């Protein structure tokens, strides 16, 4: 036997209790040895024990001293043991994955698709709803806004309101005031121009957002002086498009709004002015008297957005010296300004990819359950040799988490494809998600979801592995290693869950399809065929008087009307369906509006007399306005205020201002597909007279000319009429604008449809795997049936019924879930209700068809079994 000292070198670290037991044995050994020596010398045993104890000393003190040392070392010992066992588990899990490469590759690929889809969509969630500004303290940045309509409508505040807030607010710091500006890039006398986003900013703007120029410098205090030369800092995208990424761009110039500006800097791609979305160009703010500024700031440490709003309401109460509006101001972060429909759209898509991930987990759990039941003999032997059940559970969970981690690594790569797919799904080449990136927070999310996924689909197999009965398992292993009734029920339940979740996604996609069909059939209220519009006007610096402007508008009308192929032209403030929101309420002569008739906001448009005939907007009663004191309202407006009578002849005006107007006509309602009826009361439409000497307006043209030809001809006619007139936006076709009204529904359909098809494929694969497994499990039974005279069609029917039973159960559960879940889509639906029975019926039939296809191959294989081979199988 080896000496105890040498044995201790090879003894694994012991627990605190074991150490204390060893200490007690050591103390007892020394005392008993000394007692035996004294007894051998003739000393009585009682005297010998007393002498031995006296010589050894205070054993309780020694025990306490050694116990304290052991207690101090216990945490480190436990950590070493845990790490050692974890390394063993990971190595063993790696060997198990290597032993079944095909199985591991399939499981990892299925999970990678689910994790990648989840990560890709989470990057959108993170950008829009968690950290929308690409700055370290972006969620501390706030903007001050005036409000109206019960606080639901945000309005750019007056300069006095901004100054009062900047001077008195204590919950914010680093207040920066800037002007958002629309720039016309290029010299119109030399060639075509285009509109870009821009802002006039103070020198402290770049330090406020914490971003430095890629090239050159930012705006300096010297640039804001009245006699300073105009300079501009451009964005990286503009640097690429206008200067081909030339490194010598600094010192070159561009023309903005007809003025030459010297380029002094280039900002990185992720540069943006908070709350304004400006990326293209910034110039020096020189505090122009006619500007309408915006103000942004940062919340002080410890201050909340609620604190800032309470303070602002106290500083700027409604109808006060600094706040002329009817409601308190609002302090908002970027995440507070995300629209309800947009937020709901992102959350619905995130829920959809969550369902896809659950289905992927159920599929892999099915695979691992089959494998775990196949390894029952291995687990039983390990338990019989002394392995604890928790150690078996931990080992199987380690295999699952390792497999999920490999899938997560693949999923991160796949998430880039998903994100590109999300961008591609935006209709009309939209750029809403161009700023979305796979950031560090998203990568951490991917890691976390990989681990959670591994635990989720690994719990079932781990518990199955740890709950085996040694005798039963060893006996069963002589006949079959496929598991018992519990295993079959668990796997069947997973397939039912997959089918049910697929029903939810397919039903959602089906409702969106029916919505788009309904939107395509909607009566928009005007004739959009061949209708085009563009917005033109005089620059703010123009000094043209009303007579000059009136002559210019008439010249534009005559010039555009003379274009070959133009059938008509008129002017309005907005094109059909692009109403302005009128705030402040409406007055009806001789009548006090009841509380239920609240007209705080409504849609308004100023139009020329021939606007209705050119736009194809029928008047159901009355006639078109013939002078400046006649107005037209739509049918919804008339029903709202005159439900039991005729509105014709009534006199109305905007509350507290403007002349009275007589209602002379009632028009049909104009509705764009997908347009929501909201607190802005867009369904209440009011038309008054467009002044012929306006500073700006919309040119409405009816023509079948190609858009590029018509736009060039209109630009020339505008320039010929008056060089001072500018075209502020490209030509817009009404048909395209109408189609864009359903862009949100199309976007949701494309993504949910893709996820639903993938979910249906996974559900079919899972069902196929369960039925194939069941056929293998029942090989002997099927052989006996065939030997006793069962026909091939009987065996086929038996297997098909088993698959259909699972599918029917899944569809039944899924229909209930779909009725509940599709209520979240209510905002996006039109002409169809959540839980629509036709949609659910079609989805159920589709999934039953998929179940038949998935079950057919195992059924045919079962029908072709040779009974002799089947009976020899065991």
Image: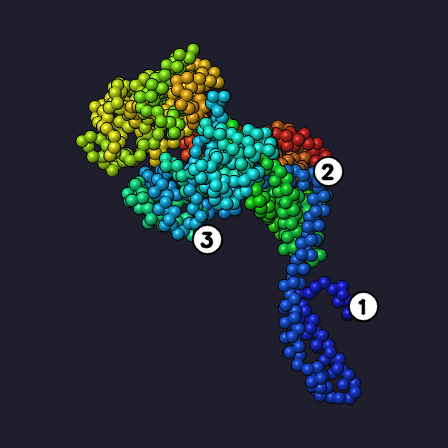
Q: Is residue 260 visible?
A: yes
Above/below status of 423 relative to 611: below
**Residue, disc 3:** 301
- Left or right: 131, with 765 as reference point: left
Q: Which mark is residue 101?
A: none
**In the displayed image of the protein, which residue is found farthest to the right?**
1
In the orientation shown, which residue stands out farthest toward the left?
590
- Give the mark nearer the N terminus: 1 vs 3: 1
Q: Earlier in the sequence, mark 2 or mark 1?
A: 1
Q: Which element carries disc 2, helix, strand or loop?
A: helix
Instruction: Identify the mark nearer the N-term, 2 or 3.
Output: 3
Q: Residues within 10 Å of mark 1 (few under 14, many from 20)?
A: few
Labels in figure, total: 3
**Residue at the spot 27% in from the left edge and 34% down from the top edge:** 585
**Residue 307 horizontal/vertical position (percent):** 39, 51
Residue 872 has which mark? 2
**Considering the image in quadrants, where does the C terminus appear?**
top right
Identify the residue shown where x is 65% and y is 75%: 65
- Do labels 2 and 1 touch, CB within 8 Å? no
Mark 3 Cα-neighbour bin, 10 Å: few <14, some 14–19, many ≥20: few
Q: Quadrant of residue 853?
A: top right
Tell me the mark number nearer the camera, choosing from 1 and 3. Answer: 3
Query: Is residue 700 rendered to the left or right of residue 216?
Result: left
SS at circle 3:
loop
Residue that numbered label 1 is attached to: 2
Q: Residue at coordinates 44% horizontally, 51% vertically from top-left? A: 300
């Amino acid at each position: 036997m080896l000496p105890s000292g040498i044995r201790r070198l090879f003894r694994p670290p012991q627990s605190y209790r074991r150490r204390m037991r060893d200490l007690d044995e050591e103390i007892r050994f020394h005392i008993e040895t000394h007692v035996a020596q004294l007894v051998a010398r003739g000393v009585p045993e009682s005297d010998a024990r007393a002498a031995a104890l006296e010589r050894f000393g205070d054993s309780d003190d020694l025990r306490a001293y050694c116990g304290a040392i052991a207690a101090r070392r216990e945490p480190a010992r436990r950590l070493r043991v845990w790490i050692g066992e974890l390394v063993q588990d990971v190595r063993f899990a790696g060997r198990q994955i290597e032993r079944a490469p095909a199985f591991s590759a399939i499981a990892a690929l299925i999970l990678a698709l689910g994790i990648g889809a989840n990560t890709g969509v989470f990057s959108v969630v993170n950008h829009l709803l968690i950290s929308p500004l690409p700055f370290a303290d972006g969620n501390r940045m706030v903007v001050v806004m005036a409000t109206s309509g019960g606080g639901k409508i945000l309005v750019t505040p007056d300069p006095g309101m901004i100054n009062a807030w900047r001077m008195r607010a204590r919950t914010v710091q680093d207040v920066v005031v800037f002007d958002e500006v629309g720039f016309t890039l290029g010299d119109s006398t030399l060639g075509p121009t285009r509109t870009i986003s821009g802002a006039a900013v103070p020198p402290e703007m770049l330090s406020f957002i914490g971003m430095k120029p890629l090239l050159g410098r930012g705006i300096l205090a010297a640039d804001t002086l009245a006699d300073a030369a105009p300079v501009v800092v451009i964005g990286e995208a503009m640097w690429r498009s206008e200067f081909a990424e030339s490194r010598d761009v600094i010192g070159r110039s561009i023309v903005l709004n007809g003025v030459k500006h010297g380029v002094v800097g280039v900002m990185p791609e992720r540069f943006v002015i908070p709350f304004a979305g400006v990326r293209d160009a910034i110039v020096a703010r020189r505090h122009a008297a006619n500007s309408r500024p915006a103000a942004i700031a940062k919340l002080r440490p410890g201050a909340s957005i609620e604190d800032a709003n309470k303070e602002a309401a106290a500083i700027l109460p409604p109808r006060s010296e600094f706040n002329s509006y009817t409601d308190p101001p609002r302090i908002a972060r970027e995440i507070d300004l995300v629209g309800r429909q947009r937020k709901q759209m992102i959350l619905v898509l995130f829920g959809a990819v969550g369902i896809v991930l659950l289905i992927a987990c159920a599929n892999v759990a099915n695979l691992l359950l089959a494998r775990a039941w196949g390894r029952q003999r291995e687990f039983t032997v390990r338990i019989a040799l002394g392995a604890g059940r928790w150690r078996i559970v931990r080992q199987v969970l380690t295999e699952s988490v390792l497999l999920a981690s490999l899938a997560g690594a693949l999923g991160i790569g796949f998430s880039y494809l998903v994100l590109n797919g999300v961008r591609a799904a935006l209709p009309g080449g939209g750029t809403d998600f161009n700023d979305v990136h796979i950031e560090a927070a998203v990568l951490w999310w991917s890691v976390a979801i990989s681990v959670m996924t591994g635990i989720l689909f690994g719990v079932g197999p781990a518990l199955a592995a740890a709950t085996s009965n040694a005798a039963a398992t060893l006996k069963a292993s002589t006949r079959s290693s496929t598991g018992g009734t519990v295993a079959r029920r668990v796997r069947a339940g997973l397939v039912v869950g997959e089918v049910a979740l697929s029903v939810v996604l397919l039903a959602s996609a089906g409702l969106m399809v029916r919505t788009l069909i309904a939107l395509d059939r909607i009566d928009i209220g005007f004739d959009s065929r061949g209708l085009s519009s563009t917005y033109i006007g005089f620059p703010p610096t123009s000094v043209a008087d009303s007579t000059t402007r009136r002559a210019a508008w008439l010249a534009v009308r005559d010039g555009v009307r003379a274009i070959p192929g133009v059938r008509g032209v008129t002017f309005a403030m907005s094109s059909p369906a692009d109403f302005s929101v009128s705030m402040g309420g409406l007055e009806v002569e001789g009548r006090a509006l009841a509380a239920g008739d609240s007209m705080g906001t409504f849609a308004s448009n100023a139009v020329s007399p021939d606007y209705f005939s050119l736009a194809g907007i029928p008047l159901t009663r009355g006639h078109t306005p013939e002078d400046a004191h006649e107005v037209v309202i739509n049918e919804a407006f008339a029903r709202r205020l005159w439900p039991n009578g005729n509105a014709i002849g009534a006199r109305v005006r905007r509350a507290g201002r403007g002349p009275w107007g007589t209602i002379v006509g009632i028009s049909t309602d104009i509705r764009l597909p997908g347009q929501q009826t909201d607190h802005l009361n867009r369904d209440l439409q009011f038309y008054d007279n467009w002044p012929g000497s306006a500073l700006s307006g919309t040119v409405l043209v009816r023509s079948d000319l190609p858009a590029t030809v018509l736009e060039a001809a209109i630009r020339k006619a505008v320039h010929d009429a008056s060089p001072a007139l500018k075209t502020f936006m490209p030509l817009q076709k009404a048909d395209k604008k109408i189609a864009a009204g359903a862009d949100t529904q199309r976007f949701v359909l494309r993504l949910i449809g893709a996820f639903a098809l993938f979910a249906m494929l996974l559900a079919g694969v899972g069902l196929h795997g369960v039925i194939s497994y069941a056929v293998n499990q029942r090989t002997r039974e099927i052989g006996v049936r065939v030997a006793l005279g069962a026909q091939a069609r009987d065996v086929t029917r038996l297997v098909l019924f088993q698959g259909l039973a699972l599918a029917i159960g899944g569809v039944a559960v899924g229909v209930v879930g779909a009725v509940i879940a599709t209520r979240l889509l209510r905002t996006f639906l039109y002409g169809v209700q959540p839980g629509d029975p036709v949609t659910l019926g079609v989805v159920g039939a589709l999934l039953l068809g998929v179940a038949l296809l998935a079950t057919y191959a195992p059924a045919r294989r079962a029908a072709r079994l040779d009974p002799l081979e089947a009976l020899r199988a065991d």
